[in-house]
């Protein structure tokens, strides 16, 4: 993958848009559970915000990965191959994987009627934990290490 000097405006916009949508999707999960129960009891669900969020996240993450593959991304700060850099790379990779797997799990439950609710929930909670750690690391870089990392996700470069 190409190494760039910074993220593009598109990459930055997608990062923050997906971050907000993931938070809303997580907060609206319970509503989807109730809607699914209503459907199973023979009722209709109507518009379910959680399902709309999940579909939007999946589409935007696919675009995000395509942009990353064609444009590249800046190298993680720190010595190449160091534990911190490898942890950042694996962490980002795992977040990408779950940003695809969690909506696909939701689609399997909602549209295909598969019995995967437990796995979908577990993976979603794992994603939220990783994101929490990710945000804390970003703040640690910005305010403790003072290396200006947050600026890389604020201003195109
Ligand atoms: C749902 C929430 C979030 C998700 C899913 C997410 C996901 C990601 C991913 C996958 C990357 C790697 C980008 C790449 O190189 O392709 C990244 C980078 C980054 N994220 Fe997040 N993020 C979230 C929330 C946040 C928050 C709340 C902050 C700040 C407090 C933050 C700060 C950053 C920064 C500074 C980078 C750039 C790191 C670097 O330059 O290597 N993110 N994020």
Image (cartoon, helix red, strand yellow):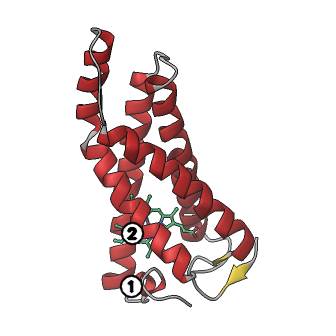
Residue displayed at 33% across by 46% down: 25
Cβ of mark 1 under 8 A from ligand 1? no
154 or 82: which is nearer to us? 154
Graded by Cα atoms within 10 Å as few (under 14), some (14 to 19) or many (20 or more), the crowding at tag 2 reads: some
Q: Secondary structure at mark 1?
A: helix
Whereabouts is ligand 1, in terms of quadrant? bottom left
Give the answer, above or below, for where 10 lies relative to 23: below
Q: Considering depth in this image, is 149 or 65 the residue closer to the camera?
A: 65
For the residues labelled 2 and 1, say whether their Cβ atoms are less than 8 Å apart. Answer: no
- Check disc 2 and report its element: helix, strand or loop: helix
Please determine whether, in this image, residue 106 is positioned above or below residue 87: above
Q: How many marks?
A: 2
> Going by the image, does 70 lie left or right of 24?
right
- Residue 73 position within the rendered picture, expressed as x and y whole percent measured from the top left: 64, 76
55 versus 155 height, above or below: above
Tell whether 18 sits left or right of 23: right
Mark identifier at residue 42: none
Q: Quadrant of the N terminus?
A: bottom right
Residue 95, percent across and down? 51, 53
Residue at x-position 32% and y-position 83%: 144
- For the point 45% across and 83% down, which residue is it? 149
N-terminal of the pair, mark 2 or mark 1, is: 2
Is residue 110 found left or right of 78 in the rendered image?
A: left
The image position of residue 106, as x and y in percent, is: 45, 32
Q: Which residue is disc 2 drawn over?
A: 137
Q: Residue at x 26, y 41 (%)?
A: 28
**Can you give x and y, in whole percent of width and height, for residue 77 in the image?**
56, 81
Label 1: how many Cα within 10 Å (few below 14, some 14–19, many 20+): few
- Which residue is tagged 1? 145
Of 147 and 2, nearer the camera is 2
CA distance for labels 2 and 1 = 10 Å
């Amino acid at each position: 993958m190409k190494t760039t000097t910074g993220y593009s405006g598109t990459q930055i916009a997608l990062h923050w848009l997906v971050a907000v949508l993931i938070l809303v999707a997580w907060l609206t999960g319970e509503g989807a559970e109730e809607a699914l129960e209503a459907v199973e009891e023979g009722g209709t669900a109507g518009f379910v915000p959680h399902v709309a969020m999940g579909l939007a996240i999946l589409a935007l993450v696919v675009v995000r990965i395509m942009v990353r593959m064609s444009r590249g991304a800046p190298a993680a700060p720190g010595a190449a191959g160091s534990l911190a850099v490898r942890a950042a790379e694996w962490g980002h990779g795992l977040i990408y994987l779950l940003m695809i797997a969690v909506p696909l799990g939701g689609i399997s439950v909602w549209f295909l009627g598969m019995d995967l609710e437990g796995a979908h929930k577990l993976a979603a909670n794992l994603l939220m934990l990783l994101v929490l750690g990710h945000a804390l690391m970003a703040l640690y870089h910005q305010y403790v290490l003072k290396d200006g990392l947050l600026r890389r996700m604020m201003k195109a470069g």
